[in-house]
Amino acid sequence: MIDRLRYLLKRYADNACNPEEYQELMAYIRKSRYEQELHKLIDEEFQLIRPGELLPEMDWDYMFNQAIASRKDQKVLKPIRNNNIIIKWSAAAAILLLAGTGTWFTFFNKPPQPVTVTASNKNDIVPGSNKATLTLANGTIITLDSSGNRSLAQQGIVNMGNGQLAYSQQASRNAAVTYDLLSTPKGGQYQLTLSDGTKVWLNAASSIRFPAVFSGSERRVEITGEVYFEVAKQANMPFKVSINDNETEVLVLGTSFNINAYKDEPAIHTSLLEGAVIVKKGDISQRLEPGQQAVSQPGKNEISIRVVDAANVIAWKDGLFRFAGTDVAGLLRQISRWYNIEIAYEGKVPQGRISGEVPRSMYLSKVIRGLEISGIRTRLEGNKLIVLE
């Protein structure tokens, strides 16, 4: 029995199970007496694929809750028979299947699907990279890459290479405050050190407008898209972030935090990692504690607070997509921005929630493979990823 189970898990990890083998594996999973053997064999197989890593236990727990909450829609394992062991080991097997691709996804409402590589998706799309444009106060536009250091140096700015830009407090500017604009395109990211020492990370399709040198009673910047801050402390000069033309404002009390304010997202999310911030919208304000996230929706004069996992929120800054119960449309919007592609749907948007992790350095084809194994079928046509019904 153990040898047969090992064989089936190996076939599953290689995405080579035929329908009969898949059903046989699911039958083993449904029988609680094989739980110990499953644990051992899945651990062994996972270590062969991803040496030194652990199966993501926390995401199994999330999957249990989602599956139980939406049991009437569960299609992965029929019948459920009120058995959490089934959910657990199916989640583990799905993670095992995707580990070999360098990605793993778990889609709560659909069974794993075979991947068909067609002629339309052989032309791969590269991931995003360090690129941005800097618009100076005088209107000069500078493309930031490995060149351009000379022209920037004259402005008291250092292009440090490797996607990093730094402003000097002693920049040779007039006393009047002048504002520069750093913008990343779709498929771009960049880092910035402001003249006060504050560090800023810009995700794809984002921008920050900021003074070349801070002066006066406050430090104010304006952002769009997604930006992560590590703010330098200056008690006598508070730091303020204006979001999407003053729709929302964040008063910073010396801290690390992330703002996701893309116009195509349903809400603005301000997530605090360290320190404290006050989020303001209209006449409403909320103070955040570390590990909390403020959510404000356009057109609504209210702010809701929830607890989040900071590691998931800032995974993009560390070179990862990390999803924890993310809806399919939200996941695809992230992919669209990073790979600079268009997303289109043939029919309805797939329902369900995704958990998983993908290095942002991967070519699009591997991400597509992870999605399709998870039950989200797609077709790539040029620069358009079409999601099939």
Image: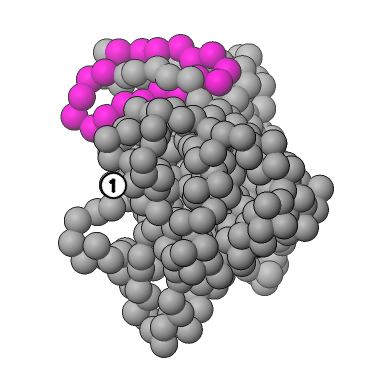
Q: Is residue 120 above or below residue 18?
A: below
Question: Tag 1: Cα neighbours inside 10 Å, few (<14), some, or many (≥20)?
Answer: some
| Relative vertical location of residue 296 with respect to residue 39 in this rendering, above or below | above
Q: What residue does disc 1 label? A: 351
Is residue 174 visible in this depiction of the protein? no
Say which quarter of the image contains residue 9: bottom right
Q: Residue at x 30, y 13 (%)?
A: 284
Residue 39 picture location, percent across and down: 69, 40
Q: Nearer the viewer, residue 71 or 30?
A: 30
Judge whether residue 354 can be spotted in this image.
Answer: yes
Instruction: Estimate the x, y position of residue 110 in percent, counting from the top left.
Output: 36, 51
Q: Residue furthest front?
A: 1
Q: Out of 336 and 51, give the one closest to the viewer.
A: 51
What residue sits 34% from the left and 79% below the top?
381
- SS at mark 1? loop
Quadrant location of the C terminus?
bottom left
In this view, the residue farthest toward the bottom is 119
Kindly indicate the quadrant of the structure image that contains residue 68.
top left
Taking depth in this image into account, of 252 and 188 the one nearest to the observer is: 188
Looking at numbered disc 1 in the image, what kind of residue is underneath it?
A: Gln
Q: Residue at x 68, y 69 (%)?
A: 146
| Residue 384 in the image: above or below residue 183 | below
Q: Position of residue 383 (x, y in %)?
A: 37, 75
Q: Determine if the magenta segment contains residue 350.
A: no
The residue sitting at 20% across, 24% down in the picture is 300
The structure's colour scheme is one colour
**Which residues fall within the magenta stretch?**
284-302
Q: How many numbered marks does the figure carry? A: 1
Q: Is residue 274 left or right of residue 177?
A: right
